[in-house]
Image (cartoon, rainbow, N blue to C red):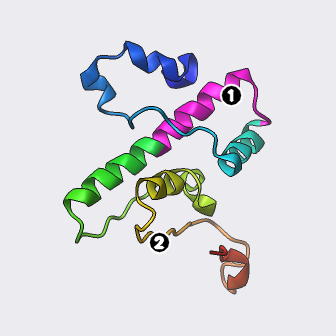
């Protein structure tokens, strides 16, 4: 719905439906994430803006769901699996979750095929803190 009609289209939903999404307003001005999205889609343009907003809502909703669970179960560890685009380079869902609470202890593991699988150069896979 967002990808076709924009974030404002959520206003037409009943309150019970809106509870399934992250609370508005969304922070959609994440420079590195916006650039990553633009690079993937061939640049930001009118058609891709709504897709970017939908992607941001997806990330924010996953983060809000994780955070809501964590607040009720603070002694539990949460394992969240998603596609790489949502958390690589600590963007997307990762960023949205840290906005909820900067003191959360989050480990981000990215899985992917690598040419050097049998003898990896681990230094090329580390992300600077």
Instruction: Specify whether residue 120 is in view.
Output: no
* Front-lying residue, 74 or 4: 74
Task: Give the x, y percent position of residue 121.
Answer: 72, 84
Can residue 126 be found in the magenta stretch?
A: no
- In what element is the residue under mark 2? loop
Residue that extends furthest to the top in the rendered view of this protein: 12
- In what element is the residue under mark 1? helix
Magenta span: helix, strand or loop, mainly?
helix
Rendered residue at 55%/50% (across/down): 92
Disc 1 designates what residue? 48
Rendered residue at 60%/60% (across/down): 88
Q: Which mark is residue 104?
A: none
Instruction: Name the quadrant containing residue 39.
Output: top right
Left or right: 78 with respect to 94? left
* Front-lying residue, 68 or 111: 68
C-alpha distance separating marks 1 and 2: 30 Å
Q: Is residue 55 above or below residue 2?
A: below
Task: Give the x, y percent position of residue 19.
Answer: 29, 31
Disc 2 designates what residue? 107
Task: Give the x, y percent position of residue 16.
Answer: 24, 24
Rendered residue at 68%/28% (across/down): 48
Q: Is residue 111 above or below residue 56?
A: below
* Front-lying residue, 127 or 72: 72
Rendered residue at 45%/63% (across/down): 102
Quarter of the picture holding the C terminus:
bottom right
Which region is colored magenta? 42-59
């Amino acid at each position: 719905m967002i990808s076709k009609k924009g974030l404002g289209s959520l206003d037409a939903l009943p309150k019970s439906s809106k509870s399934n999404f992250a609370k508005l307003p969304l922070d959609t001005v994440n420079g590195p994430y916006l650039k990553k999205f633009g690079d993937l889609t061939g640049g930001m343009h009118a058609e891709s803006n709504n897709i970017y907003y939908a992607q941001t809502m997806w990330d924010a909703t996953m983060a809000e769901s994780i955070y809501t669970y964590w607040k009720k179960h603070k002694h539990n560890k949460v394992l969240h699996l998603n596609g790489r685009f949502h958390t690589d380079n600590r963007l997307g869902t990762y960023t949205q979750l840290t906005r909820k609470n900067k003191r959360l202890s989050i480990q981000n593991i990215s899985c992917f095929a690598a040419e050097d699988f049998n003898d990896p150069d681990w230094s090329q896979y580390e992300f600077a803190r």
